[in-house]
Image (spheres, rainbow, N blue to C red):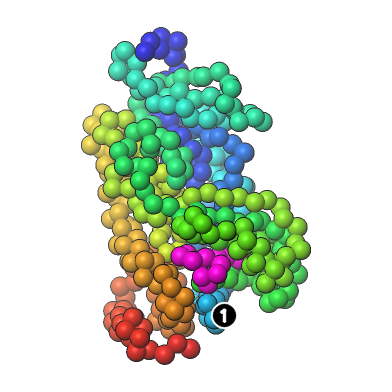
Amino acid sequence: MNNDSTNECFDVVVVGGGPAGATAANDLAGQGLSVLLLDRGGRIKPCGGAVPPILLEEFDVPESLLVARSHCARMISPKSAEVDMPINGFVGMVDREHFDEWLRERAAASGAVRRTARFQAIEHDEQGRTIVAYRPSGPEDGRDAELQRVATRLVIGADGARSEVARQSIPGAESIPFVAAYHEIVSSPPEGTRDFDGARCDVYYQGELSPDFYAWIFPHGDCTSVGVGTANKGFSMREAVTTLRERSGMGESETIRREGAPIPLRTLKRWDNGRDVLLAGDAAGCVAPASGEGIYYAMFSGRRAAEAAAEFCRSGDPKALRLARKRFMKAHGRVFWILGIMQRFWYTTDKRRERFVSICRDPDVQHLTWEAYMYKRLVKAKPMAHVRIFFKDMAHLLGFASVK
């Protein structure tokens, strides 16, 4: 193809303005690289919105973006047994509509060029340059807008779980398994309504609400996220959310918005094409199994992608692109592996879910769970606690332990 009319050229084009893409764009622009950030706009990802305190510290995010603080997580079993897991500190809650926009604005303030557009394709011109084709979008979806093209050295695909960048560039990307997530943002009821607590996150491990994942109620101050996840295509998530809203006293609460999207179940084995494309965030599968936590891991992967991209732009060596996945997996691969095993075993039947919630009563489990979540590291300071949990888990797995 002839792209003589392509006058604009950027070091990096980032496709997708969620936490991963906005973080990568901000970091790269802050290093003086020319960055174009393309985001579709008008879309809010369904998300419980929980973020650990370490995220605020690592990524210089102000606490003013938190819409609520949770001080306890309540686990509800199939038989409605309740286990409260108090938090030593707090888990922050954000509204993705405003949180993601703040991240994009920060990237622009750092020097990234920001455009609302729909990515179309990655092409290569007669000179071998990488060309990104996109259509500007506004109030409409942009499908009929005139096609625009820019040249770049590298494309970072951070365009979500069903990434078009990944589909066009990374073999096997389309085969990654997904959980579908759906939630409704509703007006929060008064404190005490059906035991509603604005400082507590409720997680339901009940097959009737989710046959293979979980359902949730996450308060966001004036509003609350009520949602469910499942990989079962025949399961009605809307009906499950309706049921959960009615049970919790929010059946008549105002529905502010409804959102749904796929969530990847595992990381891709390769994030780059060895030439000019690198993935991050959901596009690379950076979501924690079992919990579905994605905001922190998206931003962490975005930062690692920015590091690899900067090295690639400096050296011109495509092997530098491999650093992003390598560094991500070194930091979090073991946790993802453990959580994946946990999800595949404990989430399969209500009998196992009942035992899983029972395990959560254990003080050692609670301590190590919150330490790992809050600070994103496996706790090594208390080896005997790990030993005790191992034998307790074995007792539950073999059916020797009683379910309280």
Residue at coordinates 32% horizontally, 30% vertically from top-left? 276
**In the displayed structure, would residue 78 be above or below residue 36?**
below
Residue at coordinates 36% horizontally, 48% vertically from top-left? 176
* Residue 144 belongs to the span the image colors magenta: no
Disc 1: which residue: 80
Describe residue 184's horizontal placement relative to residue 316 as left or right.
right
Q: Position of residue 63 (x, y in %)?
A: 58, 57
Describe residue 267's horizontal placement relative to residue 21 as left or right.
left
Which class describes the residues within 10 Å of circle 1: few (<14), some (14-19), or many (20+)? few
Would you say residue 302 is visible in this rendering?
Answer: no
Q: Residue 164 appears in which quarter of the rendering?
A: top left
Question: What is the three-letter code of the residue carrying label 1?
Answer: Ser
Residue at coordinates 55% horizontally, 69% vertically from top-left? 208
Which image quarter holds the N terminus?
top left
* Residue 208 belongs to the span the image colors magenta: yes
Q: Position of residue 219 (x, y in %)?
A: 64, 64
Residue at coordinates 48% horizontally, 88% vertically from top-left? 404
- Judged by its main secondary structure, the magenta piece is loop
Toward the viewer: 260 or 382? 260
Looking at the rendering, the stretch of residues picked out in magenta corresponds to: 206-217
